[in-house]
């Protein structure tokens, strides 16, 4: 039985993209618009990150989402260079994971990540969850092929692993990332999706990413409804004021 009325279960802060205290639009890299979500890039032409409205009539809108984080690609006329860095992330305090109730060293205990995504280009995108205590571990994942200009809900059920460590402090503990594009410097044919493995920069985004979105000037990428919760099911999003 799935219970959808549990409070304080979402380990992601501002997952509905409601709060943007710094600005509602910026070409800066890092924390510049939507609180807690950074858009990190080091590429030829700076993209725009912005807090935008979710259009009425879309599925996320009917589920109560009114804001999204939108990235608009710049002019990448140099093509898909290997050193390109371009990803969205939230860092979660280690103590919040340690005290969540997830038995993170057990392979039979789970957390579930869910979010909504929309791309103007139909393709597959990559992301990951990554630990930042002890020997860093990473679990890369894929969205699967998205239909252009269509909101899609992504759900990833993530098991524990004996190598995971989360210290009981307010330092960075878990990184949740989704990448519009990462160059081949940060991918590897040896990466394994949906499995924990020792982190290296070469498997930041898993295997090589499709380059179509990145090489399309003005391509857009939107996300909202990020939820990370203990258990092996994605419950209804926990809306907060």
Image (cartoon, rainbow, N blue to C red):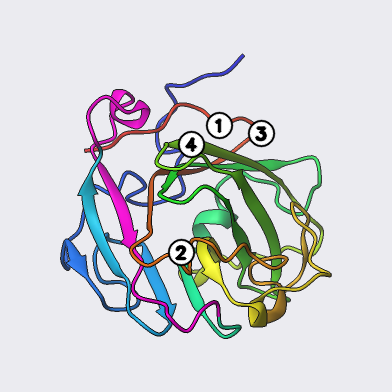
Left or right relative to 1: residue 30: left
Q: Which mark is residue 89?
A: 2
The residue drawn where x is 47% and y is 84% is: 78
The residue drawn where x is 25% and y is 75% is: 27
**Residue 120 part of the magenta segment:** no
Q: Which residue is mark 4?
A: 152
Q: Which residue is mark 3?
A: 232
Which of the two marks, 3 or 4, is nearer to us in this view? 4
Pointer 1 with pointer 4, Cβ within 8 A: no
What crowding class fits label 1: few (fewer than 14 Cα within 10 Å), some (14-19), or many (20 or more)? many
Q: Can residue 200 be seen?
A: no
Label 3 to label 1: alpha-carbon separation? 7 Å
Earlier along the polypeptide chain: callout 2 or callout 4?
Answer: 2
Counting from the top left corner in percent of width and height, residue 193 is at 75, 55
The residue drawn where x is 62% and y is 62% is: 210
Pointer 2 with pointer 4, Cβ within 8 A: no
């Amino acid at each position: 039985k799935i219970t959808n009325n549990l409070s304080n279960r979402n380990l992601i802060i501002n997952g509905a993209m409601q709060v943007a205290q710094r600005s509602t639009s910026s070409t800066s890299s890092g924390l510049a618009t939507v609180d807690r979500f950074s858009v990190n890039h080091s590429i030829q032409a700076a993209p725009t990150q912005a807090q935008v409205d979710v259009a009425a009539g879309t599925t996320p809108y009917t589920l109560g989402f009114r804001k999204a984080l939108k990235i608009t690609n710049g002019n990448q006329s140099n093509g898909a260079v290997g050193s390109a860095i371009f990803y969205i992330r939230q860092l979660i305090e280690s103590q919040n994971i340690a005290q969540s109730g997830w038995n993170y060293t057990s392979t039979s205990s789970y957390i579930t990540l869910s979010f909504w995504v929309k791309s103007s280009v139909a393709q597959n995108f990559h992301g990951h969850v990554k630990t930042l205590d002890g020997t860093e571990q990473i679990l890369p994942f894929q969205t699967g092929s998205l239909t252009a200009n269509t909101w899609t809900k992504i759900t990833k059920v993530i098991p524990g692993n004996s190598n995971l460590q989360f210290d009981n402090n307010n330092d960075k503990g878990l990184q949740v990332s989704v990448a519009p594009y990462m160059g081949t410097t940060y991918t590897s044919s040896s990466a394994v999706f949906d499995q924990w493995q020792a982190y290296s920069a070469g498997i930041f985004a898993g295997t090589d990413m499709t380059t179509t979105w990145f090489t399309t000037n003005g391509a857009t990428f939107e996300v909202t409804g990020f939820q990370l919760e203990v258990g092996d099911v994605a419950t209804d999003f926990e809306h907060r004021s």
